[in-house]
Image: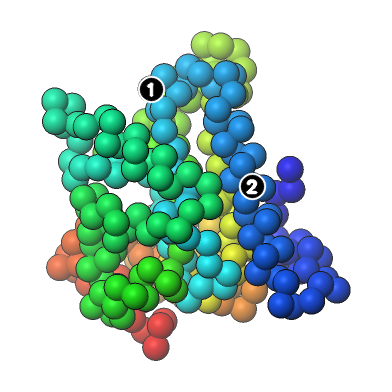
Amino acid sequence: MKLYKSFSEVKDLLKDKNEEHHCEIIKSEVRNLLEYFDREFSCNKVDVLKSKYPRYVALYTKYIYKPEVAIRGINPSYFSCRKYEEYKFNEREEDRRVLSLKGLHNLNAYTLYSEPLYHHYLVKDFKEIRNKEFIENHLMGWNNCFIQSGGQKGMEQLESDANEIDTRLKNKNSSNLIRLSLEIARSLDYLIQPKIIIYAGQPAAEISRYWGNKKSLKYMNNRIVSTEWGGFAVAVQHFSYPESNKQGSYRKSRIDELLG
């Protein structure tokens, strides 16, 4: 399976290809990556990890080649509730929503599944900056890691549990699945080539490597950087926080500034 580590590899893929076919060529690569992750997630070598983390979501939106905006978060929380409460949690509805977002699809999780705070504030911000049509037709979204875990520290707990499982089973299967997701997410950046890519939350921005290691969110937010394909990248506060928050307010104005 081809994982893209730089935009130059994408240029090689498209070299000597008619430009009118680029969209479908890239779509085929994206489909291949998503199907590969699904096979790896579905195989029994990660059954122990899946017993605690049984779901994943890759794309939050339909495929759009060179969208105006792509948003890359940290990893999925729940799609059917605002705050996880075990006694209220509707597992069947959660399964249905997650399954609806499998592979390439034509949905927009942000507008369709409004319960998560991440979706609520993202839609609120972009409706004020643009409108709902912009969100549904000019914006893509995915995460650093596709495996679903709930709560503010969900990704940290997922990584900790994966390491514990690998240590116990004397392999790297769980950690390798997380790593594969990160590599596919980075490949999507290069393949899809958004005009503006927004890294939502400090962990998402750090993994992008645009601002170096161990930089504060404020440092990264103040430095818009150019991407290899001629777009721009910015780091903002995670959309789970309200726009009325001081940093959240700067989030919206920063995005508005980039969209022009």
Q: SS of the residue at dot 1?
A: helix
Q: Which residue is mark 2?
A: 33
Colour scheme: rainbow
Q: Residues within 10 Å of mark 2 (few under 14, many from 20)?
A: many
Q: Which residue is mark 1?
A: 52
Q: Is residue 2 left or right of residue 221?
A: right
Q: Amino acid at mark 2?
A: Leu
Q: SS of the residue at dot 2?
A: helix
| Image location (x, y in percent) of residue 132 | 29, 73
Which callout, 1 or 2, points to the residue nearer the camera? 2
- Residue shown at the point (81%, 65%) measured from the top left: 12
Q: Is residue 150 left or right of residue 106?
A: left
- Residue shown at the point (34%, 34%) measured from the top left: 95
Return the disc, 1 or 2, that comes first in the chain's sequence: 2
Q: Is residue 178 visible?
A: yes
| Image location (x, y in percent) of residue 183 | 61, 47
Q: Quadrant of the C terminus?
A: bottom left
Q: Quadrant of the N terminus?
A: top right
Q: Which mark is residue 37?
A: none
